[in-house]
Image (tube, rainbow, N blue to C red):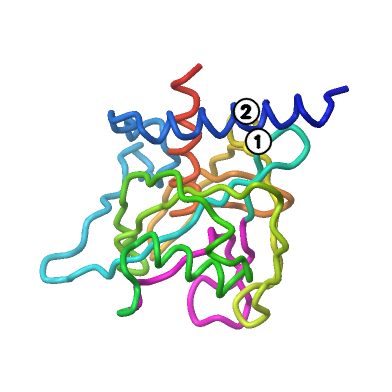
Amino acid sequence: MIDSSDRQILIQHRIVRVRQALEAGDPVPLEELLMIRDLQGQMVPRKPAAGRTPREAAVLILLYPQDDDLWFPLTVRSPHLPQHRGEVSLPGGSVDPEDADLVATALRETHEELGIEPAQIEVIGTMSSFYIPASNFQLTPVVGVTTEAPEIVPNPYEIDSVLHVPLRLLLSGETIIEEEWTLHGMRLIVPFFAIEGYKVWGATALLLSELAARLRRLG
C-alpha cells in the first residue's frame, strides 16, 4: 500500500511528465490522433472554407490527483443547449472581449461551467490549435493542474453531469472504438473513447488523443 508521502511523490512525478510532454516541440503525427476519416481512410479536412473567418476558442484539460493517478473532468452537455447538446466535452468556449488571452478564456469558461476558481488552477502548457468545422472554432487546448481534487459545482443550464476520468484510461488504448456514422449526409469513420457508456468523439477525442500520444512518447 502506498503511503501519503509516496503518493505525493508519485503524483508530482506524473505532473512533471505531463509538463515534459507538452514542452516536446515535435508535432504529433495525424495518424496517432483520433480524427474522423472518410471510408477510404483519408482524414476529413479541418480548415475553414474560403472567406470564412474562424472564431477563437479554448478548452481546459484540468488534471487533479486522485489515488495514485491524475484524473480530469469531462462534461455532459445539457440537452437544452442550442449546440452540442448531450455531447461529452472539455470545459471551455469562445473568447470574450474581456479575456486577456486564450488561457484566460479556458479558465473563465471552466469557472462558469464547473464553479472552479481560476486561482486554484496552475496552467502548465497548451497543445496544438485545431479548426472545428461544425462550430467554426479555432480551438486551443490548455492544460492545468490542481493540488487536490476540486469541488465541482456544475452550471445546471450548461451541464447535465460530470464524468471523472483517470489519465491512465487514455494511455491504455482499451477504450478506443471506431464506427461508421452518417454526419452531414456523409458516411464517415468516427473514432471515439468509450467512457462510462458515453462516446467521446470529435474535437474532444482529438485533443485527448494528442495528450495521450505526447505522454506515450516519453515511454
Expressed as whole percent of the image width and height from the top left, the position of residue 120 reads 59, 58
Front residue of 68/179: it is 68
Which amino acid, by three-letter code, is at mark 2?
Ser
Q: CA distance from mark 1 to mark 2?
A: 5 Å
Front residue of 27/32: it is 27
Rendered residue at 84%/26% (across/down): 3
**First to last magenta residue range:** 74-96
Expressed as whole percent of the image width and height from the top left, the position of residue 6 reads 75, 24
Picture quadrant of residue 189: top left
State which quarter of the image contains the N terminus.
top right
Rendered residue at 81%/31% (across/down): 4
Side of 29 where 112 appears, left or right: right
Under circle 1, the secondary element is helix
Front residue of 83/217: it is 217
Expressed as whole percent of the image width and height from the top left, the position of residue 165 reads 68, 46
Number of marks in the rendered image:
2
Which residue is disc 1 drawn over? 169
Which residue is disc 2 drawn over? 172
